[in-house]
Image (cartoon, rainbow, N blue to C red):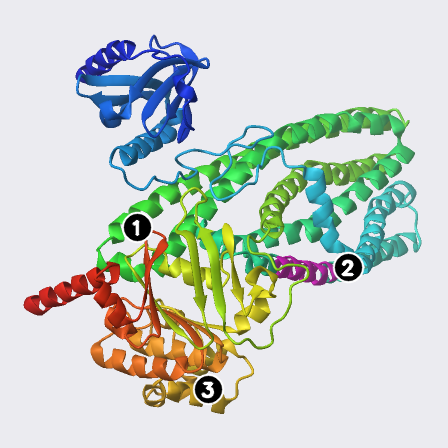
Amino acid sequence: MPVLEKEAVKDAERKANVHAAGTPGAGSVGEPLLVVPYDIGSEGQPVDGEVQVFADRIEVRLANQLSSRLDMAQVKEVRTVSSIGGGVLVADTEEGPVALARYTSVHNGRMGFVVKLIQAVLKEEELPVPSAKDIPRFCPTCNSRLTEGTNLCSTCTDQGKVITRLLGYANPYKRSMVSAAILMILATLMELVPPYLTKIIVDDVLQVKSIGHALFWLVIGLAGTRVMLSAMQTARGYIGVWVGSKIMGDIRKDTYQALMNLSLSFFDRRQTSQFIGRINSDTEAMRQFLTDGVIWITGQVLMLVAIISVMASLSWKLTLLALLPTPLIIIASMTIWPSIRNRWYRQWRAVNKINMLVGDALQGIRVVKAFGQEYTEKDRYRDANGTLVEQTIKMEGIWQGVFPVFALITTSGALLVWYFGGWNVIRDELTLGTLMAFVAYLGMFFGPLQWFSQAINWMSRALSAADRVFEIMDTPSEVPTAKNAVSIPRVEGRVELAGVTYGYEKHHPVLKNVSLQVEPGEMIGLVGHSGAGKSTMINMICRFYDPDQGSITVDGVDLRGIDQVSLRKQIGVVLQETFLFDGTVAENIAYSKPDATPLDIMRAAKIANAHDFIVRMPDGYDTRVGERGHRLSGGEKQRIAIARAIVHDPRILILDEATASVDTETERQIQQAIARLVKGRTTFAIAHRLSTLREADRLVVLDKGGIAESGTHEELLDKKGVYYKLVEAQKEMSKIRGVQA
């Protein structure tokens, strides 16, 4: 910390004593907006304290006792002063800086958010919402820090339940897996035959120099064993591939279905790029464990049991010597397992971060290039890639250290067998063939034992992947379909909002006690400043979100009691940001109604004023639009979206800035299409150009989360209220643009 900063902090701490411990019980008035801990006292000693931020004051408590208080009226600004390993929360007042709390670097994020919150209170601005980076979340069971965007704790997850659930995916294919297991058992037994035949060849043929056909038939036996073993392994491998592909398909299907069933709010809080890895990479790790891992581990266990039995039958003394290193290998493997699991999870997080970064950059490549931020994105990728390299080195470094150690341990057992077994051969207490067979079995024994660490690797990867996949499957939808939900084959289109309150964050409602009745076939224009709640209202009508308070009904039926598939068949949506899939024009128009005929598609395109430009394309309706429709202009995409809504034939229509960002001629064509589309349908329209809503039956003006006024265009102009001010402001903007042009 610079000298001047040190002196400022000391002076601030001195002045903090002046504000210390005011009125007893002062902290009981009102609820704090935020409570964060701090852990260093004024003398540098560890303490257990709290900073409590209220709407009118800041209180600092030490061991649950009020140690200082500062009224918001005294505060000019709040800041943090960084130092090595931590910092100081400082409030600037008329009298000078006041040190509120000292803290270690673990609280940097929290104190940074304290500054943002207090600054918002001082400026009477909207209060910020903390992220996991600002205020980290911790597991309520083991107090481990949770990763942002997940409620999964990798430390205290019940691995037994995860394994049981994972194995459940193999249950439908148990017959095939049993067949594979039988083949593995037979192959295991078959692998035990060659060393025994070698013993017979050495002891009964080569040493006695027997002349006859015995050697020939024994060699034929060895060859036959190898052929049968190869055939069994091939058959088992094919079954494993078949079962593995089926299991992987089932896991991917369940994961994707779970994602499709989740509400929009789930995706609002997360980057969608991460789910690509969960569906692909994580399911592959689970499949590898269920097929290769389970079958391989089972086979190796059977192999160990069989080998020990045969070795004991040859020489129980040498068997005991051979087994001496075994406990060391098992103990070492179990000891490093937690470390492996932790490092594997960190490596996955690094991979996930780099995938999300690449996904975001490529999806927004036009923005990146438009603002010349290629070097910024390269730097971000370099940092993320460096983290991944570091975690990969740590992860793979374990194996590079473990394998030589395991090899050394297993070698010690082999050396004991060679030494004591060799003495027994010299003293004629053991035949040479028996010793050679025993050494061969010993090599087979330490092979699977040494690769026991590979089983740990498979299991660690699979369990980590299963945790993340099952988290998606177990996440409940915030807008679930009721068990007794009803279907609505066709509605009249009467929509009513009764006392609707909703906020994307519960403590900050966007809509506040909104009530509105809309008759069938009525066109409602939603008007208001940016952030007034227009888009939120139409999201509520589509039931993308459920109200925190109040209800929304269609034809008198609460949306929460209507089957969602049935409801969406009655609602058509044309958004400002038109999304087209990477398919043909015809496929995009028919997306809302897959069974639409070519005639239906063409009729919808004509109504949407899209037919003319479509037929001028090289392949007409079979022209591919590219990813997100990048081969089409904004107006062309918008008209295809309108055609998509026309094919859907909805009773309730949502138009969200459907004519935004297009030229005058294109807007005229879109307006003509919309005019045809809205006939006979209940329509909710949002438009940034208020003139486009003049034909609405009623305009509803939203302001500060509520309905400020309602009426026709002329009625609202006569009132000279909020709508009048919006119109006048837009006229002024048009004049400015005209002068600039």
From this viewpoint, is residue 77 visible?
A: yes
521 relative to 361 in the view: left or right: right
**Placement of 695 over or under 375, stated as above or below:** below
176 relative to 559 in the view: left or right: right
> Label 1, label 3: how many angstroms apart (C-alpha)?
42 Å
* First in sequence: mark 3 vs mark 2: 2
Query: Quarter of the image containing the C terminus?
Result: bottom left
> Label 3, label 2: how many angstroms apart (C-alpha)?
42 Å
Q: Nearer the viewer, residue 213 or 476?
A: 476
Q: Nearer the viewer, mark 1 or mark 3?
A: 3
Give the residue at mark 1: 377
Q: Magenta segment, which residues?
A: 239-254
Res 122 quadrant in image: top left
User: In the drawing, what numbered circle is on residue 601?
Assistant: 3
* First in sequence: mark 1 vs mark 3: 1
> Label 1, label 2: how many angstroms apart (C-alpha)?
46 Å
| Label 1: which secondary element | helix
The kind of residue on which mark 3 rests is Ile
The kind of residue on which mark 2 rests is Pro
Local packing at callout 1 (Cα closer than 10 Å; few below 14, some 14-19, many 20+) is some
User: In the image, what residue occupies the spot 92% across and 53% down?
Assistant: 214
**Placement of 309 over or under 519, stated as above or below:** above
Give the residue at mark 2: 172
424 relative to 165 in the view: left or right: right
User: In the image, what residue occupies the spot 73% across and 49% down?
Assistant: 167
Query: Quarter of the image containing the N terminus?
Result: top left
| Label 3: which secondary element | helix
| Label 2: which secondary element | helix
Q: Which percent across, then down, holds residue 396? A: 52, 38
Q: Main secondary structure of the magenta part?
A: helix
**Placement of 292 over or under 84, stated as above or below:** below
The kind of residue on which mark 1 rests is Glu
